[in-house]
Amino acid sequence: MSQKEDFVAAIDIGTTKIVAIVGKRKENGKIEILGMSKTASKGVKRGVVLNIEEAVNSIQKTVEDVQFTIGKQLSDVYVGIAGQHIKSIKNRGYINRDSYDDEITKEDINALIQDMYKIPIDIGEEIIHVLPQNYIVDNETGVKNPVGMSGKRVEANFHIVIGQVASAKNIGKCIAKAGLKLNQLVLEPLASSEAVLTADEKEAGVALVDIGGGTTDIAVYYDDIIRHTAVIPFGGDVVTKDIKEGCSILQRQAELLKMQYGSALGDLAKEEEVVSIPGISGREPKEISFKSLAYIIQSRMEEIFDAVIYEIENSGYFDKLSAGIVLTGGGALLKHLPALVKFKTGLDVRIGYPTEHLASDAIAEVNHPMYATSVGLIIKGFEQNDKNKVSPKAKIKEKEIELEENFEEEELTERKDNKYGFISNLKKVFTDIFDEDDAEM
């Protein structure tokens, strides 16, 4: 499926599920989801691909399902990246321009961004995103978009996201082996932010916390600028594991118990309420109280949010988050979790759904915190497509350059022809003279 048709396809490779999703942008800018398929994720742990063959099988299965649904073949896809290896740094760059009078162009800004990809980083790492925060034109600070301004020196502060080359390559291998082309890797918290955060929240100051199966992703915004990103290597899976071990039951039973009867606040659970779990291989069933289940969940969720708070404090914007925290991801729907987070942080908390960006006729199932990253990847895909489109002015300029180059090439060929034509004529004259002399002798 070509992006020329204004379709975007994305794959969210998660620890618990792999989602293939295809979207189309309507005239009002909303995303219409044409097809979505999910399958259990294999070969992925804490957001990192560890077994390529298993991951490829899962990707192929979900891609085949979505292709059948929409009746079209997928060719190129946008893919999310997360994992413990992700880190972010800040950097500053500048360019000196030739003239004060010429307007600053998009090309100038692109040159500044491209320079950031050349900064020295550790061996085995690569730069995934270069995100401009703000610009300084000559001595004018706090400029959000310098295009069209006049100035000689353009500086910018950048938020740079770095990941391991091996992890990125493994994702690339999986996509290639599944018969697809990787368009771009997108940091998952950035994708989720696009899907669930409003423009007002980003301006006022907000922290997005995306609780997945294997990782918890964080993105901090203030004054409409991305200030901090981080990936914590814990998610809903560790909560399930704690329930499994604490109650001596099977993994699948622990997952069902968490989803159906779990709570993130032990004090709000009723002690007299119990759930009966069938015994393993005909053994006696187990009775588990809602209160003891809730305390197991609460202790692990508190640990995860201690790490989240540490990351937000690290960003330096904890006290500026007027819009508080937005929880999304599959783990966000855990009962009483917003209350626990509000109690621990003192900030406003809401659950983030991708509603705002979805067309009214979109598949209802997609409007769920679990699919925030998937919808965000589609939005990011359209953004990237818009950037890749060449403006009419640039096309005219490109044509002019091409014509000039062709003219210069033709002129050079003509000169060569004239030069070699003259030499060959001269050779012919000399040959004729010597031939005449030989004949006379």
Image: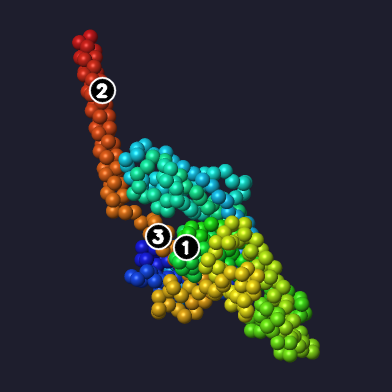
Q: Give residue 266's quadrant in the image.
A: bottom right
User: In the figure, 346 relative to 421: above or below?
Assistant: below
Disc 3/disc 2 C-alpha distance (Å): 54 Å
> Does the residue at mark 3 contact the one at mark 2 (Cβ under 8 Å)?
no
Instruction: Pinpoint residue 18: horizontal percent, then vertical percent.
Output: 56, 70
Q: Residue at x 29, y 43 (%)?
A: 402
**Amino acid of disc 2:** Ile
187 left or right of 290 in image: left
Q: Residues within 10 Å of mark 3 (few under 14, many from 20)?
A: some
Scheme by which the image is coloured: rainbow
Instruction: Pinpoint residue 67: horizontal percent, then vertical percent.
Output: 46, 73
> Does the residue at mark 3 contact the one at mark 1 (Cβ under 8 Å)?
no
Classify the position of the C terminus by image quarter. Answer: top left
Task: Identify the residue position indicated by label 1 in the image.
Answer: 203
**Amino acid of disc 3:** Asn
Task: Identify the residue position indicated by label 2 in the image.
Answer: 423
Instruction: Pinpoint residue 83: horizontal percent, then vertical percent.
Output: 61, 61
- As drawn, the label of residue 385 is 3
Disc 3 element: helix
Q: Residue at x 51, y 50 (%)?
A: 158
Instruction: Pinpoint residue 350: horizontal percent, then vertical percent.
Output: 54, 74
Q: Residue at x 54, y 74 (%)?
A: 351
